Image (cartoon, rainbow, N blue to C red):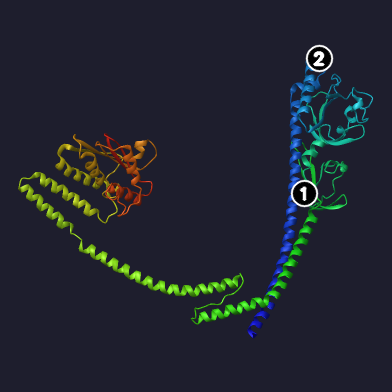
Amino acid sequence: MSRRGRVGKQMYLILLLTLIIPIGIIGIIAAVLLMRQMNSRYEEQVKAENTRVKSILFDVTSSLYTNLEPVLSVQAYRDLFSSETFGEVEEREFNEVNRTITSMKRTTASISTINVYTNNPKIPTGSYIINVGTTGVEENGDAAGKAAGSGVADDPFSRYEWYKGIDPDAWESYTCIHVPLNEYENAYELTLVRRFNTGNSDNRAYAVATVSTNYLRNRLITTDNYMLACLDGTPAFFSSEYDDREKEMPEIFSENTSNYNYLGDIMLDGKVALTYVSSFAPYKVDSRFFVLVGDYGAHKAVREILFGFLLVLILAILGPVITIVLYSRYFTSRVYTLREAMHRASTGDYDIIESISGDDELSDTFNDLKLTTEQIRDNEAKYYEAKIREQELVNMQQNMEFKMLSGQINPHFLYNTLEAIRMQAIRGGDRDVATSVKYLAKIMHYVLESTGTSTSKLSDELKHVESYLQIQRLRFGEKVAWNFYISDEVNTDEYRILPLLIQPIVENAISHGLKDMDKNGHISIVAEYESKIKKNDGNNLIITINDDGKGMTEEEVIALNKSLDEKRNDQDGKGAASIGLYNIHQRIKLHYGENYGLTIRSQEGKGTSVELRLPD
């Protein structure tokens, strides 16, 4: 019992210390990393939102600039505003300008207003063309009622708000002006002013287009983030808060601000927000836009996540501590049971009948101990069985070597014997027998030399077939004829082939195709590359053995081709039928791969063709 008490005390000390200290340290580090990661995440989000707003503003301003091109780029329109007369041609161009602007207004949702202002006294005021007169006094001019106020007497354009915010000599400028929405309120809208090139004429003309604030709100406001957009030196022309129109951009720029970018906390409407301010230059206009995006909820969200993490961390420490104290006695009793069982096993007592309750690593260890003792006994038995089988294999190998040695024949003895028989036939005047013995000796020589070798030259294989056919001619006479067709691309002295592939097919052709024919039969052996046959890039060697024998039916051909890939054994009853073709097909597949082998084609009464597909 004293040992069990020591185990419990050690568990209290070690487990409590190893739990509280590591989890506390890891928790603090994780909390710091989590805060950094969350802050970084919200910073990236506010940057991405700022980039999105800038991208939309750049797109809108670029479209506004290019939409004015059909008005300012036409030479006829420029000539109209510099003209000293207003005749038929000028009137036609005047109407065309109004039609162009009308079409632009109808097809471009981003444009709130668009007008052309000119001081040319010959040009009348039209739908979108305003003659500002010749003086800055409000009472003068054809459209004095449209002026924003009185201006300089010698500059009629000075009465307009858009003119006061630009450089009169600049070709393009951005400014912001108040556009009446109704009789009670105005909209402060972004405005693009582009000057017509009227040459040296004193007459001037400006195209003035404003961007719809409602259009910007529809495109920009997709989140709860606070947004401001303004031109350099002007109040904001866009704000996500409707009441913040014409609000000044916060003064956050300093000497350390790089490229007009700022990321940090700013007090917006009395609340701290994670804010990113950046700028961009519009398309082809020497101005700079500033965009501010602030996230009010970023810091709150980070604090809430951190609080939740710390709460989970505290529970993660307290819960296990309480559980360990309650579980300690139960655990130490099971450890003691396991220790006793392991001690008995170490002394050679493998009869373990105890068990440990529960479903955890201790119970798994106890079960593994029982399995280990059982496997020790099984492995001892298997070891002796393996030794017995190993000895049996050694005995079988020795018997096979003995049979091979006892059945070995000296090839020179066979050649000498056959040569003696051939010479006796010549002396006896029997030339046919002498010829048969000569070809038989060649066949025996090729077969014996091929034994134990993996490949032989194609030329030797063809000579072996020639010897076999010569013997068959002595047997059947002129009933058997043959031809070899070897393509010039095939080098028979260099190409290596599995020995004894072609002769069994030729033998099969004579035995089954030509044997029972009434007329003379013919066998042809063709060797050529696949690229020459099918006019493609294939580099396989195709050897075809053709006969003009009785052939086979379509069903017989299908069954024969199918049988070539069927597995066979000595007891399946298929051994005799096409065993030679089957062996050749299987040898080719085993040596060269599954893409190679035999293909049989035949037509009843027209002969049979056996194709060998071999690699280059």
Residue shown at 33% from the left, 39% from the top? 555
Secondary structure found at label 2: loop
In this rendering, position of residue 505 left or right of residue 234 = left
Q: Number of marks in the image? A: 2
Residue most extreme to the bottom: 2
Residue most extreme to the left: 428
In this rendering, position of residue 212 left or right of residue 583 = right
The kind of residue tagged 2 is Gly
Q: Residue 213's x, y, as percent?
A: 82, 37
Residue shown at 8% from the left, 50% from the top? 423
The label shown at residue 448 is none
Q: CA distance from mark 2 to mark 1?
A: 55 Å
In this rendering, position of residue 32 left or right of residue 266 = left
Q: Residue 303's x, y, as percent?
A: 79, 59
How many residues crowd around disc 2 within 10 Å: few (fewer than 14), some, or many (20 or more)? few
Secondary structure found at label 1: loop
Work out whether mark 2 precedes mark 1 in sequence or the reverse, and give the earlier one.
Answer: 2
Q: Residue 341's x, y, as percent?
A: 55, 79
Quarter of the image holding residue 471?
top left
Q: Which residue is at the front of the view, 176 or 47? A: 47
How many residues crowd around disc 1 within 10 Å: few (fewer than 14), some, or many (20 or more)? some
Residue shown at 12% from the left, 52% from the top? 419
Q: Which residue is mark 2?
A: 87
Q: Quadrant of the N terminus?
A: bottom right
Residue most extreme to the top: 88
Say whether residue 24 is visible: no
Q: Which residue is mark 1?
A: 261
Say whether residue 293 is visible: yes
Residue shown at 75% from the left, 59% from the top? 35
The kind of residue tagged 1 is Asn
Q: In the image, is residue 317 above or below residue 615? A: below
